[in-house]
Image: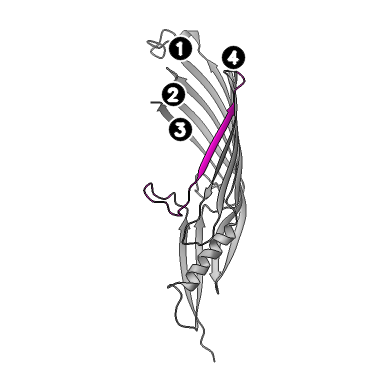
Amino acid sequence: MTRRDVLELEVELRNASGSFNKDGNNDKAYAARVAYSPTLGAELGLSLYGGRYTDVISGSDQNIKTYALDLMYRKGPFEIVAEGYHTSFGDVHAVFQGLANRITNGETESADALLESEIEIAPSGFSGDRYGYYADLKYHFWPSFLNGTFLATGFENPDLILVGRAETVVWKDVVDAVTIEDGIASLEREDRIQDRYTFALAYRPVPDWVFSLAWEYSLAKKGDGLLFPDTGKNSLSSWMAGMSFAF
């Protein structure tokens, strides 16, 4: 009888942004944006981004390309802000196959010819294409009864803003699992879609400062769970409070 032994390995693999002091793939990324503003309260912009996201470990030369279109329009107290985008990560299967080639031909492969390797990888955040949009509808107002309160004292033109936002994110061909056997990478994939709705009240005492209170509802329309946050749930609602300023 021929002996058959199997070496099973489980690996978790995540995307990483890299460091600021080292170029992980010896390549450069490029970004550009052009905008058209016919009036002071209107602007249409087009953004482009391109670069190589794979490193020397995979050995697969894959590029990331992003196209985005954004819009801002304000008339009276109403304001619309919207953006749509599409990102392509190239051939994701080739990335994992390149990793499989390195594992098969590298030091991790046993010298025992009768020992077969089965490697299971749990990837996180890998997908072939991503696209989505968001749209904000804002209403600026200031009730007169607030003029004598601390919200208006010392400020020239304070502002309250009601905000309603709808957004959708689509990840095509999300890699849920990878199995490497006999040097061949097999991928399990699924599409994942998430909607999110936000209602908020923002207070701006001056243009560069904002305090906000928001309610947010996220819904997984397709897939095993939410993309953001990755809790394994199909829906999630939450309250948020925050502040920001420009300097």
Dot 4 lies on which element?
loop
Mark 3 and mark 2: span between their CA atoms?
14 Å
- The type of residue carrying mark 1 is Asn
Which residue in the protein does label 2 denote? 210
Magenta region: 18-39
Judged by depth in the image, the label closer to the viewer, 3 or 1, is 1
Which residue in the protein does label 4 denote? 76
| Mark 2 residue crowding within 10 angstroms, few (<14) / some (14–19) / many (20+) | some
- The type of residue carrying mark 2 is Val
Dot 1 lies on which element?
loop
Mark 3 and mark 1: span between their CA atoms?
25 Å
Mark 4 and mark 1: span between their CA atoms?
15 Å
Foreground of the two, 102 or 77? 102
Dot 3 lies on which element?
strand
Judged by depth in the image, the label closer to the viewer, 3 or 4, is 4
Foreground of the two, 27 or 173? 27
- Image quadrant holding the N terminus, namely bottom right
Q: Position of residue 72 (x, y in %)?
A: 59, 25
> Main SS type for the magenta part?
loop
Q: Earlier in the sequence, mark 2 or mark 4?
A: 4
| Mark 4 residue crowding within 10 angstroms, few (<14) / some (14–19) / many (20+) | few
Q: Earlier in the sequence, mark 3 or mark 1?
A: 1
Q: Position of residue 21 (x, y in %)?
A: 36, 48
- Disc marking residue 240: 3
| Mark 3 residue crowding within 10 angstroms, few (<14) / some (14–19) / many (20+) | few
Left/right of residue 29 with respect to residue 172 in the rendered view: left
Left/right of residue 240 with respect to residue 189 in the rendered view: left
| Mark 1 residue crowding within 10 angstroms, few (<14) / some (14–19) / many (20+) | few
Q: Earlier in the sequence, mark 3 or mark 4?
A: 4
Q: Residue at x 58, y 19 (%)?
A: 41
